[in-house]
């Protein structure tokens, strides 16, 4: 996405802008993907949210999946990063910070060093794809809190659902075949 004139807006500023301003921004400044998924910033050539984690386009997620296909533990971690957490009252998606216990319950990764190695592998692939060492899909915070942008949580979740549906329809197809079919 290109930001013209040096204007930087947060998601909150975009959401609280008058409807006419939102329509103007959506039609002239923002690309279709940003409009569909919420407003994002581009810092130093890296698409990121206003709070730090990278925001990947669908093509980047597909590329990450292909590059993680041979690293089963990191692939499990990648899918665990994809959450469908939403507010049950409003139905809106909301960010969810993962904890070590989430990974222990839903993946084969049993210890923190292995978990951190997998997160490092995922981040390193994204950094190599973008050619930018400042791109992080998952940020590790204090007390082992793992943060991923809510848009990415949802996009990864959608891929997981799609792969599950494809696998149920084609049980004889290997994972690498599924990865190719979603491209």
Image (spheres, rainbow, N blue to C red):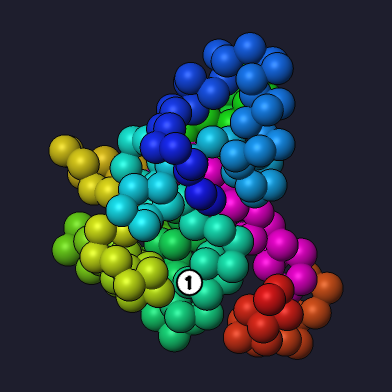
Count all numbered tags in the image, as a single digit.
1
**In this rendering, position of residue 163 left or right of residue 150:** right
Measured along the vertical axis of the image, is residue 58 above or below residue 32? below
Which of the pair 94/23 is nearer the observer? 23
Which of the pair 157/20 is nearer the observer? 20
Which of the pair 161/102 is nearer the observer? 161
Measured along the vertical axis of the image, is residue 13 above or below residue 182? above
**Does residue 93 show up magenta in the picture?**
no
Which residue extends farthest front? Answer: 5
Q: Look at the image and tell me whether residue 120 can be seen.
A: yes
**In this rendering, position of residue 22 left or right of residue 181:** left
Residue 59 figure quarter: bottom right
Residue 162: x percent and y percent?
71, 62
Which of the pair 58/68 is nearer the observer? 58
Residue annotated with mark 1: 64
Residue 182: x percent and y percent?
70, 74
**In this rendering, position of residue 60 left or right of residue 110:** right
Residue ID at (26%, 41%): 145
Residue ID at (69%, 47%): 32
Residue 35 figure quarter: top right
Residue ID at (67%, 83%): 180
Give, as a single range, the part of the protein colored magenta.
148-167
Which residue extends farthest right? Answer: 169
Residue 146: x percent and y percent?
30, 45
**Does residue 164 show up magenta in the picture?**
yes
User: SS for tag 1?
Assistant: helix
Residue ID at (54%, 36%): 39
Q: Residues within 10 Å of mark 1 (few under 14, many from 20)?
A: some
Q: Look at the image and tell me whether residue 88 can be seen.
A: no
Residue 85: x percent and y percent?
55, 35
């Amino acid at each position: 996405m290109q930001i013209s004139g040096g204007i930087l807006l947060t998601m909150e500023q975009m959401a609280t802008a008058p409807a006419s301003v939102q329509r103007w921004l959506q039609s002239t400044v923002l690309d279709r993907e940003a409009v569909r998924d919420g407003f994002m910033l581009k810092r130093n050539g890296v698409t990121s949210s206003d709070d730090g984690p990278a925001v990947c386009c669908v093509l980047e997620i597909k590329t990450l999946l292909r590059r993680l296909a041979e690293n089963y533990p990191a692939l499990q971690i990648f899918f665990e990063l994809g959450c469908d957490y939403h507010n049950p009252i409003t139905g809106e998606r909301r960010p969810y910070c993962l904890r070590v216990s989430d990974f222990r319950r839903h993946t084969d990764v049993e210890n923190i060093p292995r978990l951190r190695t997998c997160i490092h592998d995922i981040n390193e692939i994204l950094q190599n794809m973008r050619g930018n060492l400042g791109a992080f899909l998952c940020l590790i915070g204090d007390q082992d809190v793992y943060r991923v942008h809510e848009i990415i949580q949802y996009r990864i979740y959608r891929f997981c659902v799609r792969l599950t549906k494809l696998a149920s329809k084609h049980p004889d197809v290997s994972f690498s075949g599924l990865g190719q079919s979603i491209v």
